[in-house]
Image (tube, rainbow, N blue to C red):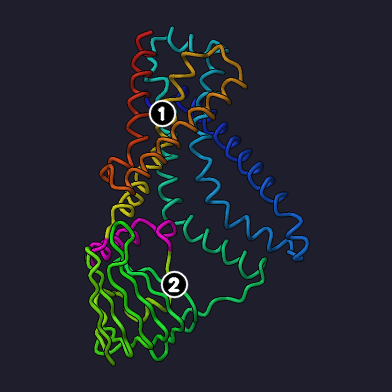
Amino acid sequence: MIGGRLDRYLAFRFLKTITVSVASFVIVFVSVDAFDHFSRWVDRDVTIGTFLRYYFYGLPYIVILVLPVAVLLSSLFLVTSLSRRNELVAMKAAGIGIPRILMPLFAIGAVASMFELGVGDFVVADASYRQSMVKREEIDRIEPVNYAMRNDFAWKSPAGAILDIGFYNGETEVMTDVTIEWLDDSARVTRRMDMERMIWSDSSWLAVGAVERVFGPSGALVYTAADTLPVTGITEVPRDFGTRQKATTEMNFFELQNYIHQVEAAGGDARGDLVELYLKLLFPLSNLIMVLVGAPLAMRSSSSGKASGIGLAVLLAFVFFSLLRFGQTLGHNGALPPILAASLADVVFILIGLLMLARTART
């Protein structure tokens, strides 16, 4: 019966081991990072409150980072322990199959995946931004940025244009000393506009004192100078420049999806952003996949000690994250479709896990 005493026993032990593993990883991570920055923070008179806030906001990212490894390590430790104490033999002697024995572990892995999906998508991005603000304002003592009126900053448009802005005044909706460059897929400048001012007029941008250069593929140049020129290809409105532009890694799923729609509507290349979008959905599955791979593997090597288990977990995690990064790179370069690039590591490890589970179930 699902949810019986045996299921609760296995689920409790597995959850307890995961909790201890995550806590250990977090303590080690924070300790190493704190000691690395200790002398610098002492020189800047960083208070205990600032120290605690900095790592409190960094905690969600650390947990999400180490959770898959903790799940893998816990599955190896738990199954090895059950085997060493002959509990697995007793379960199989009672007629319980291997897949049924591992069902509570798969359930916890699925819950961990859903937890990571929720926390990673809606908590980590905001917490990481708050951590960066604590570092900027309380540790580095840099004045807060007034996004409604600022100078000398760059802006990347969803259309792929790069704006170099000398000064932006959000109250008058005017920019001064502006340079805009449009690049193709090979990072070659195809168009450039230099202007004294860029003003928002009649729901569109207008360049004042402008020079425009259009570079053809064969090196031909079309040069235009005028008192005023319309600025086409910039989809942002003034209020967009008056807010902090998020990196794609700081966006949640819906924000990134909306950003991709803007890029595609403007004719930009959204392949890399699509890879990141699919990763937001597929990476949390790594927790369930680690159980699928780790538990059958531990059954086949139950005589190994804890040191061997840790080494095996590190090796598997390294291979998984290497495949993840490899697929991500191929997706950004356009060598693989975004969905395949984002799922490469998951697909490989799911196939390996199912194969090992089938072989273990037959023994």
Q: Nearer the viewer, residue 3 or 79?
A: 79
User: Percent position (x, y) of residue 56?
Assistant: 61, 56
Determine whether 40 is above or below 291 in the image: below
Q: State which tag comes first along the sequence, 2 or 1.
A: 1
Q: Quadrant of the N terminus?
A: top left
Residue 248 percent coordinates (x, y): 40, 59
Q: Position of residue 178 (x, y in %)?
A: 39, 81
Residue bounds of the magenta highlight? 247-268
Q: Residue at x 38, y 10 (%)?
A: 95
The dot on residue 111 is none
| Front-most of residues 269 and 79 | 269
User: Can you tell which mark lies on residue 154?
Assistant: 2
Residue type at tag 1: Gly
Badge 2 vs badge 1, beta-carbon distance below 8 Å: no
Answer whether residue 184 is magenta in the image: no
Q: Which residue is mark 1?
A: 3
Q: Amino acid at mark 2?
A: Ala
